[in-house]
Amino acid sequence: MNMLRDKDHSTLAHRVDTLLFSHNDIIELLAQYLALSEQEDDERFDTWFDNLTKEQHTVVKTFEVYRGQYEHLD
């Protein structure tokens, strides 16, 4: 986590920190995102993703930024 915190995520962190989601809401959203994105049914994923709220999109996008940085740690 410290390596990610050293990068400037202030804008992303501020967006997520101001959302009115419980920790459970975020965990459930990310669990759905991972489960659906790993399935072969692209149409089901697209429908789910298209029906997310703006706030849910913010959480998923922020997750992907952080995830991408973890995947590219040297």
Image: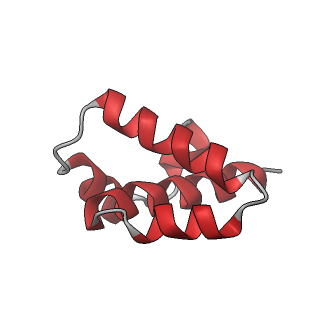
Q: Quadrant of the N terminus?
A: top right
- Give x and y (percent) for residue 31: 54, 38
Left-right relation of 44 to 22: right
Q: Quadrant of residue 27?
A: top left
The foreground one among 56 and 8 is 56
How many numbered discs, if any?
0
**Above or below, comparing residue 60 to residue 54 in the picture:** above
**Above or below, comparing residue 18 to residue 21 in the picture:** below
Q: Quadrant of residue 59?
A: bottom left
Left-right relation of 17 to 49: left
The foreground one among 34 and 47 is 47
The foreground one among 56 and 18 is 56
Residue displayed at 56% across by 53% down: 66
**Above or below, comparing residue 44 to residue 29 in the picture:** below
The foreground one among 74 and 53 is 53
Left-right relation of 22 to 71: left
- Residue sitting at the far right: 74
Residue displayed at 48% across by 61% down: 48
